[in-house]
Image (cartoon, helix red, strand yellow):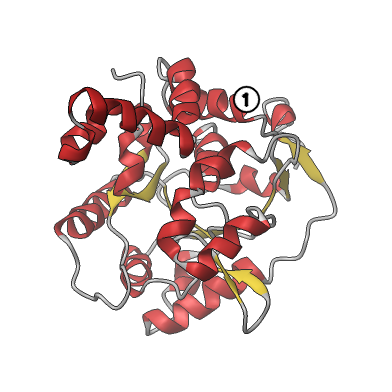
Amino acid sequence: MKRTVIDVDFLAQKSIFFRGRLGNWFARIVLHLLAIDRINWAYGRSCHCTGAAFADGLLNDFGVDYRVGNAERLHNLPEGAFITVSNHPYGGLDGIILIHLMAGIRPDYKVMVNQILTLIEAMDENFISVQPRIGNNTTPSAAAINGVRETLHQLKNGHPVGCFPAGAVSMFKLRTLRVRDREWQDGILKLIQFAKVPVLPIRFYDKNSIFFYFLGLINWRIRSLRMPYELFNKKGKRPRLGIGELIPAEEVAQFSGAKELGDFLRQKVYDMPLPAGFIPKAELKDFDKTSV
């Protein structure tokens, strides 16, 4: 297995600009400026592991000790298939946290992610590759169709799936002066409707840096260049997430339209009260599962 996520050879394959001695030198400069070399360093230290163990190695190298509120609700997870829905404030770290948390309980848990994250080969067993909607494009790509098929197959066989219905990192909105997901994607909501399985809301309470959202006001592509740095600036900040109440499949089935279901699930996530207490990541493995 490769010990890097994106390296000089990868860039050289994508563009002639990075080929040859001078091109390779410039590629190394780009990898350093975008902090991708630091991503490669963390990846190389843990790529011999997979699933929750790999995520644990990354989080330790990032210095992230996330905290979970209402953790006792994780005791009541269904034995078969279910779907987790979450807001997407980090654009990368939240997916790693979800896999560490949920795959630590259910190793068969997979998260729907965009294609760029599938470059992290050590997490192949926990990723389902999809291509989120970009701009006003409503035509599903082949990757999106294949991702939906794999997701439905995963659920049909009794395995859980996680998703970020926004399909993109949260944005700072001047109109409301708040960081919120963009409109949740109709395709993902229709998939949840069709699946007819319980849904578990999960809320991430914290955010990326102010500078990250400022760049987003300029252009989302410029903001994306900042993403690797956002994995390393959470050291010692202990991000918080809350576990919502499991929504039975019968309640999900009551909604006739994807928009109505989306409004309901989004409210369940964003209106989730701040839990009274949180359990640190480091203590989750010692969390007494017979306490409820």
Residue 138 image offset from top left, x and y in percent: 24, 76
Along the viewing direction, whichever of 2 and 163 lies nearer the viewer: 2
Residue at screen point 68% across, 72% down: 271
- Residue 143 visible in the displayed image: yes
Q: Amino acid at mark 1?
A: Asn
Q: Is residue 7 visible?
A: no
Q: Vertically, is 86 above or below 252?
A: above
> Could you say which quadrant of the image residue 97 lies in?
top right
The quarter of the picture where the N terminus appears is: top left
Q: Nearer the viewer, residue 10 or 27?
A: 27
Vertical relation: 108 (above or below) 168: above
**SS for dot 1:** helix
Q: From this view, report whether residue 67 is shown above or below residue 51.
A: below
In this picture, is 91 found above or below 22? below
Which quarter shows the C terminus? top right
**Residue closer to the observer: 71 or 75:** 71
Q: Residue at x 25, y 57 (%)?
A: 148
| Residue 281 located left or right of residue 187 | right
Which sits in the foreground, 209 or 201?
Answer: 209
Q: Position of residue 74 (x, y in %)?
A: 62, 45
Q: How far from the left and from the top, in percent, is residue 289?
A: 69, 34
* Residue at the farthest right position: 276
| Residue that numbered label 1 is attached to | 60
Residue 55, percent across and down? Answer: 51, 30
Residue at image coords 56%, 52%: 90
